[in-house]
Image (tube, rainbow, N blue to C red):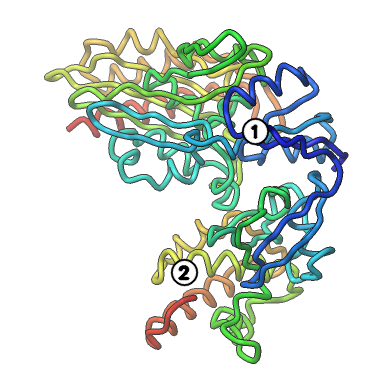
Amino acid sequence: MHPFAYFEPTTLDETVALLARHGRTADLMAGGTDLLVEIKEQIRRPAAVINLKKIPGLADLTCDAATGLRIGALVTVRTIETSAEVQKLYPALAQAARDIGSIQIRTRATIAGNVCRASPSADTLPPLIAYGGRIEMVGPSGPRSIALESFFTGPGKTALADGEIVTALVLPPQPEQAGSDYIKHGRRKAMELATVGVAVALRRDGGVCRDVRIVLGAVAPTPIRARAAEVLLEGSTPDETTIAAAGCAARGESRPISNVRASADYRRAMVDVLTRRAVAAAWERTR
Amino acid sequence: MTAPITTVAMPVTITINGEARDLAVAPFRTLLDVLRNEAGLTGTKKGCDVGDCGACTVLLDGEPVNACLVLAVEVDGRAVTTIEGIAPEPDRLHPLQESFMALGASQCGFCTPGIIVMAKALLDRNPDPTEDEIRFGLAGNICRCTGYTKIVEAIRATARQMAAAGQPRE
């Protein structure tokens, strides 16, 4: 690795000051599983690396039916994968966490790092958006929070401003009779980037579904909502015909590219299949 | 105040296989390189060096990590267990090492240290894993010789032996 200066700030104020001093020549490090690879492969050549792991409180995780889920910026993917509370209340997120890399990677990698990396195929993004998640940041002009849905602006690009640091991801409490699912499609089961990922979150209201959110990963420059598919399901009974229509609509909303992992046509076909399966599985979980 | 730990080597104390080691390491060096070059422990292998192959798997405070994706300076004050440190005593091997030999689970051997360390982490958490659980757990360890069948068999055999012997897994 090329040489860099290394900092271990112990407060957010210090970190913000360090970022202000070093500007874009500094990179923040949480888990480091993407950053160190990019430095080794000379995709990035930071003059300074600012390790966030010594900042107290950033690794806190709270998950509660009444208050929701709060994921500090240093909470690892493995912690989310293995949390019994997250598995129970936010199963699509726990599943997406389980689908990332290997145990060794997940032990180091953070959810916030997966978010900031903003890969179009990142597994945790569709469920975080489907659950209505928000992202909290702090910078020179103080703290702010925005919906994750509007955080991603392009491949590797986010609404994070220069000098800002992500501090937490916050998901609202789950409604009564909630159901959700995430399905990742790849060429193999593990150590794989998603060819297509689909997350669905909804709730049961008698015989119909409400508050339907369908988020597609790896089929556009950022994760996208399949809004036409959501509208078809909203207030409807998700029977076979309705679910098939939703899958078809989601397929039409996807904007995939062809690359080494799959063709655009194949991705569109899989959006249809996975959307149908994920809606059915989410609905089944509301029982 | 933020200590501006520059590119110059900084002193760290890492407990490696139970022994506190005082080392001077530059911040851009990985735990893997420091284990192999400064600590002289070459059992931990450098395969891909980007977290894909698992040959560099070590335990950091008991949890499996790719040593190639950990900065050595981050490990100051923490405990690392490598393949050299899993045997219960100098003249005895860990049951996983015995099973790998007895069942032919190692061919060229390059991936074996990482796989055995990962398998130890699995058995520490789950003493009686199914084949699916073993395969899921070893997803980040690549072997290009064996086809994995004998590796999985050796890990299952170890779990059975350890259960039968009722011995602690440390």
Is the residue A70 above or below the residue B147 in the image? above
Point out the image quarter for the C terminus of chain A: top left
Q: Residue B37: x and y, percent?
A: 84, 63
How far separated are the C-alphas under marks 2 and 1?
36 Å
Point out the image quarter for the N terminus of chain A: top right
**Furthest residue to the left?**
A206
Where disc 2 sits, the SS reads helix
Q: Is residue A168 left or right of residue A207?
A: right
Q: Is residue A254 left or right of residue A226?
A: right
**Furthest residue to the bottom?**
B91
Where disc 1 sits, the SS reads loop
Pointer 2 and pointer 1: residues touching (CB < 8 Å)? no
Q: Amino acid at mark 2?
A: Leu
Residue carrying label 2: B123
Mark 2 burial class by Cα count in 10 Å: few <14, some 14-19, many 20+: many
Q: Is residue A272 left or right of residue B152?
A: left
The numbered disc on residue A9 is 1
What residue is at 54 percent from the left and 68 percent from the top?
B119
What residue is at 67 percent from the left and 57 percent from the top?
B54
Dot 2: chain letter:
B
Q: Amino acid at mark 1?
A: Pro
Mark 1 burial class by Cα count in 10 Å: few <14, some 14-19, many 20+: many
What residue is at 64 percent from the left and 75 percent from the top?
B85
B56 vs A48, nearest the viewer: A48
B153 vs A32, nearest the viewer: A32
Q: Quadrant of residue B55?
A: bottom right
